[in-house]
Image: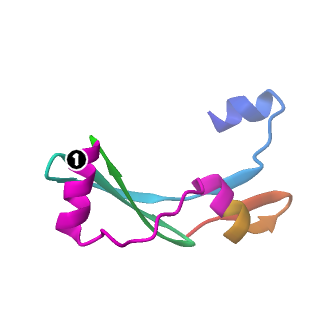
Amino acid sequence: MAAILEALGYRPALVYEKRRTTWRVAAAEVVFDELPFGLFLEIEGEESSILEAERLLGLEDAEAEHAPYPELTLRHGTEKDGVVEARF
């Protein structure tokens, strides 16, 4: 896919690597993401399932990060040849 995009004249502007583990906690899906600049947890499901998973994991008072990974990469990544990168 990268070769096709480059052949069309596109170049990467931002690159980040991520390792993801997916779990089921009660009726919610919990994903644990490891990025070069931090560890992040997402809980997906119905609101009641999310609240139950937060309670079971002891995360009721955890601070939420609302910025998407591309924005966090711009903040914490390094620029190399005009491309902002966050790699392991």
Residue at horizontal 35%, vertical 73%?
61
* Left or right of residue 4: residue 10: right
Q: Which residue occupies the extreme left position in the image?
A: 26
Is-magenta flag for residue 59?
yes
The quadrant of the rendering that contains the N terminus is: top right
Residue at horizontal 71%, vertical 67%?
75
Tell me the residue that label 1 is attached to: 48
Q: Nearer the viewer, residue 10 or 56?
A: 56
Res. 84 image quadrant: bottom right
- Please report the bounds of the magenta region as a residue range: 47-72
Asked if 11 appears above or below 7 in the picture, the reply is below
Q: The residue tagged with tag 1: helix, strand or loop?
A: helix
Residue 87: percent from left, percent from top:
60, 66
Residue 83 seen in the figure: yes
Residue at horizontal 64%, vertical 62%?
72
Is-magenta flag for residue 39?
no
Residue 77 seen in the figure: no
The quadrant of the rendering that contains the C terminus is: bottom right
Q: Nearer the viewer, residue 42 or 34?
A: 42
Q: Nearer the viewer, residue 74 or 12?
A: 74
Asked if 66 appears above or below 57 in the picture, the reply is above
* Left or right of residue 68: residue 62: left
Asked if 25 appears above or below 2 in the picture, the reply is below
Q: How many marks?
A: 1
Residue 20: percent from left, percent from top:
38, 57
Residue 16: percent from left, percent from top:
61, 58
Res. 33 image quadrant: bottom left
Q: Nearer the viewer, residue 75 or 79?
A: 75
Q: Amino acid at mark 1?
A: Ser
Q: How is the image coloured?
A: rainbow
* Left or right of residue 2: residue 81: right
